[in-house]
C-alpha cells in the first residue's frame, strides 16, 4: 500500500510545473507549483495533521523541508534533489526516503550560496523549533 502511494506521489511530481506532490493517508493527492517550502508550510498552517502518514515527492528537499516533513508525520519521501543536511534529519526521525541526487546543501535561487531556509535551521535539531524559526524567517522575507 505504501509503495503504491509513494509511486503515485512521484508520478504526480512529473506533471507539468508540479514542484510538490503528496498522497495523503486518505488517498487524496495534493499538488503545488509553488517553490521552496511554501507548499508544506501552507498545508501545515491549514491543518497540522494533514501530512501524517502521507507520502511526499518534492523536486528539492533541504533541511528545512525535512523538518517540516518530520513535524507533519510523513510516512515516506522522494526528493529529486536532497541535501545532506536533509538526509540527516530524515534518518534521525526514521522517515524512509529516496532521491535522484544528493547535494551537500541546497543552493539559493540566485546561485550564490546556501538557501536561506536551510541556513535558518542548520543549527537546530528539533522539528517544532525549526517550524517556528521558518515561520519567522518567511515573515521577515515577505516584509521586505
Image (spheres, rainbow, N blue to C red):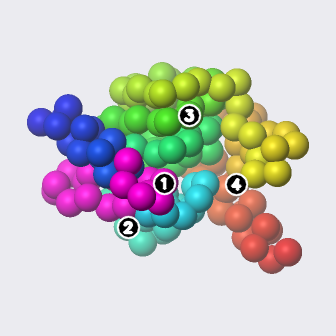
Relative vertical location of residue 46 with respect to residue 127 in this rendering, above or below: below
Visible residue check, residue 48: no
Reply yes or no: does residue 107 show up in magenta: no
Precedes in sequence: disc 4 or disc 2: 2
Q: Which mark is residue 47?
A: 2
- Determine whether, in the image, residue 86 is placed left or right of residue 39: right
Nearer the camera: disc 3 or disc 4:
3
Q: Residues within 10 Å of mark 2 (few under 14, many from 20)?
A: few
Residue position for label 3: 81
- Residue beneath the point at 25% across and 54% down: 24
Separation of marks 1 and 2 at Cα, in angstroms: 20 Å
Q: Quadrant of residue 11?
A: top left
Q: Nearer the viewer, residue 4 or 90?
A: 4
Separation of marks 1 and 4 at Cα, in angstroms: 23 Å
Residue 14 location, x and y as percent? 38, 48
Separation of marks 1 and 3 at Cα, in angstroms: 12 Å
Residue position for label 4: 133
Amino acid at each position: 500500500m505504501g509503495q503504491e502511494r509513494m509511486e503515485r506521489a512521484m508520478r504526480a511530481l512529473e506533471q507539468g510545473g508540479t514542484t510538490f506532490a503528496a498522497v495523503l493517508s486518505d488517498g487524496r493527492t495534493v499538488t503545488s507549483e509553488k517553490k521552496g517550502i511554501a507548499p508544506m508550510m501552507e498545508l501545515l498552517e491549514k491543518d497540522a495533521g494533514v501530512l501524517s502518514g502521507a507520502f511526499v515527492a518534492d523536486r528539492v528537499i533541504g533541511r528545512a523541508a525535512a523538518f517540516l516533513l518530520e513535524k507533519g508525520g510523513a510516512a515516506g519521501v522522494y526528493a529529486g534533489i536532497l541535501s545532506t543536511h536533509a538526509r540527516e534529519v530524515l534518518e534521525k526521525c526514521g522517515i524512509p526516503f529516496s532521491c535522484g541526487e544528493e547535494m551537500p546543501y541546497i543552493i539559493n535561487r540566485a546561485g550564490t550560496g546556501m538557501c536561506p531556509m536551510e541556513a535558518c535551521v542548520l543549527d537546530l535539531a528539533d522539528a517544532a523549533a525549526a517550524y517556528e524559526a521558518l515561520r519567522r524567517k518567511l515573515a521577515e522575507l515577505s516584509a521586505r
